Image (spheres, coloured by chain):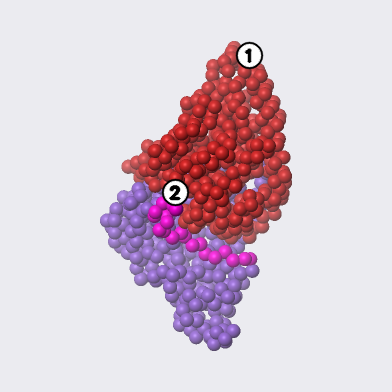
Chain colours: A red, B purple
Amino acid sequence: MTYERTHIQLMRGYQPGAQPGHVAIKLNTNENPLPPSPRVLKCLADIPGKTLQRYPDPLATEFRASVARHHGLGAEQVIATNGGDELLRLALTTFVEPGRHIGIAVPSYGLYSVLAAIHQAPISGVALTDAWRLPADATDRWTSDGAQLVILTNPHAPSGTLEPIEAIERVAARFRGVVLIDEAYADFISPDIMHDTTKLINKYPNILILRTFSKGYSLAGLRLAYGTADIRLISPMIQKTKDSYNVDAIAQRLGAAALDDTEHASASWQYVRKQRMYMTSRLNQLGFDVLPSEANFILARVPRAAGWHDARDLHAKLEKREIYVRWFDEDRLRNRLRISIGTSAENRTLVSALEQLRGSGQVLQSS
Amino acid sequence: MTYERTHIQLMRGYQPGAQPGHVAIKLNTNENPLPPSPRVLKCLADIPGKTLQRYPDPLATEFRASVARHHGLGAEQVIATNGGDELLRLALTTFVEPGRHIGIAVPSYGLYSVLAAIHQAPISGVALTDAWRLPADATDRWTSDGAQLVILTNPHAPSGTLEPIEAIERVAARFRGVVLIDEAYADFISPDIMHDTTKLINKYPNILILRTFSKGYSLAGLRLAYGTADIRLISPMIQKTKDSYNVDAIAQRLGAAALDDTEHASASWQYVRKQRMYMTSRLNQLGFDVLPSEANFILARVPRAAGWHDARDLHAKLEKREIYVRWFDEDRLRNRLRISIGTSAENRTLVSALEQLRGSGQVLQSS
């Protein structure tokens, strides 16, 4: 006897990247390599017992005001969520009838398909071009499937490529449902590109932008993200579909403290960009084919080498050295590794490990 | 143009109790009147930046092990959630087909109906008896409506009455779906009643028990709760339907620290029981009819008095004095107030305010 709904029985859950102990070099889940702002840690240490004792503000009023100031929006255009996952789920709950499609690019962040399966929303998947970009007819294909929601990661995961503002605008202008832009990695975009989608919010009533503190603000452990959109998208999620106290009191305070010290955060973004250049060039030298990335990770095609059979094997060999990167058992990704940008020391250790492994197949196999 | 699903447009969201500033006497949302354990605050102050920087354990392994030890269960019989709200939602998502009923007692915690409305699950509401107890035919009525899930608050909210173990067992034995017992207030039950439902978990595969740190452990601001049940109920929620990183790293640590100091928490429960007796007897003296409560609140019928028209008016008059209690615009509740048990000083202030208001109608009305 089972009590599970039939489609839940039949589906597979999302598999997060491994969370090994602290000794490992952990470049598998796209965290920021640098710690959060000292002001955030000070704010944490100063949290009074009373803040824990009382329910948090269900509307996260002060935090949303901080976000609104940061982007030049109104607070009513902002929703605070328990990590980006919650905003993704709320978008399905609020805007998609079960049975109606969700449009995504393929490949994409694996969680989108899992959330769609829970919600019984079929996937309308549009394959990215060879250059890992959206094909020109993507919107038409989502529309012809009758999709009610499109979710796009930009910069894209797991490739790191960036669709320019104009491409996003083209989708929003043509698509008749909600267009959720998952900007989890947007903080790491080179500033000279001047990529700022905030201005689209007042222009397109169907754009919903997801931002998170997990990567850019080094606060993955905190679970804090937010959505910005026209009030007609934000309001039903805040007033009706979110859990009543969805964001805890500590996260509300620390999030505001993090936004008070964007200097600290942007220094980490700049650091990641430099290390991203370093890793791209070193991996290229080692024969890996690395896509140009605007995120805090790179997707690298694994070359033939004496020291490993394929990407999966290299992934396992690195893991034996306690270096964790991500391998996906999925079309177009099986011969690649997604590598989060770590600290300079972590990145160098990975590069030396690759150098050692590359030419040392037999030595390793006998060990 | 709206993007909301039709039934979301038509529904009303949950209205949490007011969260006024810190000056007020706040007896409207059932928080613990005493602060959390000093060990919890020490644990908070000691959280290292690295804990925030990394994703939390998606399985909350150590926290669940603590809960399991606490109840004498296996860790696989425990799920950690972002407050009790999340467990309630997960139970619907995992076990209830939209269109199928959810069984509840009437009246009940208002959030149940809101979650049901979001999920498009009609409510099978069974009115409590005059003594605020489940009628003998409750299970038959839920069954004849085809309910797949029954949610019972025990001790009941907002009355505070307790259904004994045998009554819970009768429901679990007869009902063919999942029986969720929301034990948000169970920590405040008098210990001499020996009310312990944990033993039912290994006996009934359909019982799911919700416990929270919000009330008993003075951690409402943290958003931490858990469910205990047979592994066949817990596993699909952990593996499939919960958000991937649903409980943040701070909550996981603080929850374990709180369970390491149950002495502190049980002292607060004992304090609440004493104050509950005090408030029950003082309100009775003032002509209020107070139901016997095993929770950290009481439901009091408001007597006729010169100083107020009715319960709603008394609620408003107390609010003018910055004393917040809860009034529900709902059958059987309109002539009552739900009053959380506060500190001794808060409770006395409320009692004096009632004494002053009772005989001072004209003075107040002219003010």
Q: Circle 1 sits in a helix, a strand or a loop, which is it?
A: loop
> Does B207 sit above or below residue B12?
above
- Which is nearer the eye, A19 or A151? A151
Q: Which mark is residue A359?
A: 1
Residue at coordinates 42% horizontally, 56% vertically from top-left? B9
Q: Main secondary structure of the magenta part?
A: loop
Residue at coordinates 42% horizontally, 40% vertically from top-left? A143
> Does B205 sit above or below residue B139?
above
Q: Is residue A253 left or right of residue B61?
A: right
How many angstroms separate mark 2 from mark 1 (CA)? 53 Å
Q: Which mark is residue A41?
A: none
From this viewpoint, is residue A222 visible?
A: yes
Q: Residues within 10 Å of mark 1 (few under 14, many from 20)?
A: some
Q: Chain of mark 2?
A: A
**Residue that carries the numbered disc 2 in the rendered image:** A95
> Does A117 sit above or below residue B22?
above
Residue B109: x and y, percent? 44, 61
> Does A250 sit above or below residue B109?
above
- Write down the region rendered in magenta: B1-22
From this viewpoint, is residue B85 visible?
A: no
Which of label 2 and label 1 is nearer to you? Answer: 2
**Three-letter amino acid code of the residue under disc 1:** Gly
Quarter of the image where one finds residue B117: bottom left
Residue B271: x and y, percent? 57, 65
Q: Circle 2 sits in a helix, a strand or a loop, which is it?
A: helix
Q: Is residue B17 left or right of residue A358?
A: left
**Three-letter amino acid code of the residue under disc 2:** Phe
Which residue extends farthest bottom? B362
Q: Residues within 10 Å of mark 2 (few under 14, many from 20)?
A: many
